[in-house]
Amino acid sequence: MLIRKASVFLHATFHTQDRCASFMKTWIQILILTIITFTLITLVTMKIETPFDGNDTYGFPFTFHIKWSGECFDCPENPTETYYGYLLIDFLISGIIGFGLLKLFKRLKK
């Protein structure tokens, strides 16, 4: 009787560990896809205009970082400005895209 209870307990424990490992694997894959998506979208949509008296802007769909340069009349005291709220929103949008890509990869794999 004791051996059977121990066997059931060990089976449930290993099953829970398998679920936890699978859950962590999925979240790590989503995180990696999110970082890759965020980096690619930022690199593709950034505007580097400082060599031509312009502003550098980073972020899509929301601009989260601006660097002012060149001649401007109403320039702020700090030549760079970062909007952390927009950075978070852009990262969350990349996370949604990463989640969708993971689901698409898993569906195509089947």
Image (cartoon, grey):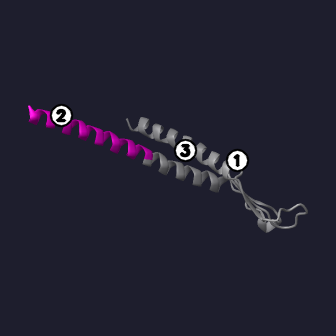
Q: Is residue 34 magenta?
A: no
- Between 53 and 91, the residue placed more toward the observer is 91
Q: CA distance from mark 2 to mark 3?
A: 39 Å
Q: Most extreme residue toward the front, as rendered?
A: 2
- Mark 1 residue crowding within 10 angstroms, few (<14) / some (14–19) / many (20+): some
89 left or right of 15 in image: right
In the rendered view, tell whether residue 93 sits above or below residue 2.
Answer: below
Q: Are marks 1 and 3 in contact (CB under 8 Å)?
A: no
Q: Most extreme residue toward the right, as rendered?
A: 73
**Residue type pointed to by label 1:** Phe
Residue 8 - label: 2
Location of mark 3 (residue): 95
Magenta stretch: dominant SS? helix
- Which corner quadrant of the image does residue 12 belong to? top left
Question: Which residues lie in the magenta part?
Answer: 1-27
- Which badge, 2 or 3, is on the more N-terminal residue? 2
- Mark 3 residue crowding within 10 angstroms, few (<14) / some (14–19) / many (20+): many
Instruction: Give how far across and how far down residue 110 sits, in percent.
Output: 37, 35
Q: CA distance from mark 2 to mark 1?
A: 53 Å
- Between 9 and 85, the residue placed more toward the observer is 9
Q: CA distance from mark 1 to mark 3?
A: 15 Å
Instruction: Give how far across and how far down residue 75 sits, in percent.
Output: 85, 62
Location of mark 1 (residue): 62
- Which badge, 1 or 3, is on the more N-terminal residue? 1
